[in-house]
Image: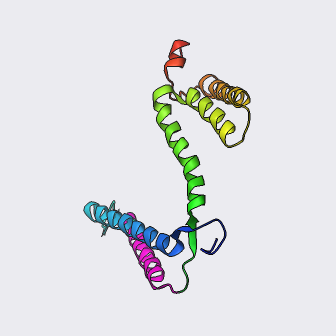
Amino acid sequence: MHDDKGGEGPSLVSIRTMDIAVAVFCLVLAAIIIMDSTRLGFRWREDGPAAGYFPFYIGLIIAISSLVNLARAISSKGAPKTFVTKQAFRQVLAVLIPLAVYVLFVGWIGIYVASAIYIALFMWYFGRYALPKGAAIGIGVSLVLFVMFEIWFLVPLPKGPLEDLFGF
């Protein structure tokens, strides 16, 4: 945790703001659970609990807990404490955005080729390894995973045009 007077730079979001956001999100989730449980029926019947019985009470517990957290967050006093700084958030995005691109590429070029590219670029950019070394490790890891899943375990994972070219 860093204050706004030093540390890693200016605050992007405070802990209080995140507490409020998470409490509101959990309240919305609880409302959805409770509404759907009501639709299914949440009372005890002669033959046992209705389909929504347990989800209803779990939703109720989530709602009550979220209300308590929301009240605490709103009523908190004192100097705001930093949840994340701009610099730290940039670092998170530097990993999250390539990961999202990787996930998109899995559906397009298959998991093995996408993984080889992702590992190679990740090692090159973050690990400062030479690109040929990262590519060799990325290809090696993907080949090991291919043999393990496709041949040994017979678990098919998403494949792309390269695997089609080799008949898999």
Answer whether residue 53 is visible to the viewer in this image.
Answer: no
**x and y, in percent, of residue 163 in the image:** 54, 18
> Does the magenta stretch mainly form a helix, a strand or a loop?
helix
Residue 125 against residue 149 in the figure, above or below: below
Where the N terminus falls, by quadrant?
A: bottom right
Image spot of residue 64 (x, y percent): 41, 77
Please indicate whether residue 23 sits to the left or right of residue 126 in the image.
left
Q: Nearer the viewer, residue 12 or 166?
A: 12
Residue at 43%, 78% in the rendered image: 70
Q: Residue 154 colored magenta?
A: no
Q: Is residue 76 magenta?
A: yes
Residue 138 placement (x, y as % from top left): 67, 30
Q: Residue furthest left?
A: 39
Residue at figure coordinates x 49%, y 69% from the top left: 18
Q: Quadrant of the C terminus?
A: top right
Tally of numbered discs: 0
| Residue at horizontal 41 percent and vertical 78 percent from the top | 67
Residue 59 left/right relative to 95: left
Which residue is pictured at 57% across the width and 76% down the height? 81
Location of residue 8 (image quadrant) = bottom right
Q: Which residues are magenta?
A: 55-77
Query: Camera-side residue: 54 or 135?
Result: 135
Could you tell me if residue 145 is visible in this image? yes
Q: Quadrant of residue 42?
A: bottom left
Where does residue 159 sit, x and y in percent of width and height?
A: 51, 25
Task: Give the colouring mode of the picture.
Answer: rainbow
Relative depth, front residue between 93 and 76? 93
16 to the left or right of 148: left
